[in-house]
Amino acid sequence: MKKICLPVVLALAFLPLLSAQEALPPSAPPAGHGEKHDDSPLHKEMEALNRNMRKLSRQYSDAAQKESSLKLVSEMLANSEAAKTMIPSQVAKLPEADQAKALEIYHKDMDTLSTELTTLKELITAGDAVAIKAQLDKLNDVKKSGHKDLGVKKGGPGGDRPHGPGPEEVH
């Protein structure tokens, strides 16, 4: 009797959710879909940088992945340097009088990112997993700060998650 009742109870519990989806007009996209996606060159550079950051945060503690990790950081540095030469859409949308100040803030943030990535590369070369973890966390803070400065909305995977295993988990 219990085996039969559980599926029935679950189905009844989720019935209101299914009914709400059916109530949407056919032309309305499901929640979270159909939003404008930025395919600008700057967005692509930042996405590549973020993708490599996620890869690095999964592998930095593996000494056998040291060369791969160094390559990822080199690519991230190239992404950040390329991105620095571009104008963020948030800046371009500002009144002309405010654009110079916003661009100055953006360049300062990108310089900070490059400096911190260079430090990360040095730490990977030294093989100090605890310091690498701390630097990855610092880079995440740099990302959050820079996005806050420009009003970039959080999105995509990895938004504010800590990177990699904690120091006590590193062997």
Image: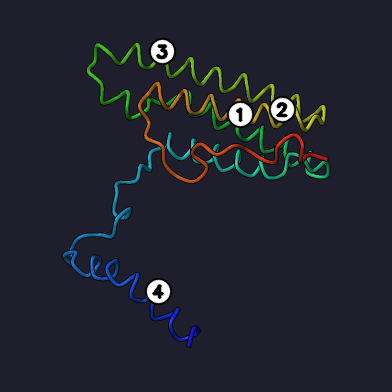
Residue denoted by label 4? 10
Q: Secondary structure at mark 1?
A: helix
Q: Which mark is residue 77?
A: 1
Circle 3: residue type: Glu
Q: How far apart are the two marked residues, 4 and 3, measured between alpha carbons?
A: 55 Å
Question: How many numbered discs, if any?
Answer: 4
Q: Earlier in the sequence, mark 4 or mark 2?
A: 4
Circle 1: residue type: Leu
Q: How far apart are the two marked residues, 1 and 4, measured between alpha carbons?
A: 50 Å
Residue 56 vs residue 49, the one in the foreground: 56
Residue denoted by label 3? 104
With respect to residue 140, does 13 lie above or below?
below
Position of the C terminus by quadrant: top right
Circle 4: residue type: Leu
Residue denoted by label 2? 121
Q: Residues within 10 Å of mark 3 (few under 14, many from 20)?
A: few
Judged by depth in the image, the label closer to the viewer, 4 or 3, is: 4
Q: Name which quarter of the figure residue 112 lies in.
A: top right
Asked whether the residues under the numbered discs 4 and 3 touch, taking CB atoms below 8 Å apart as contact, a structural biologist would say: no
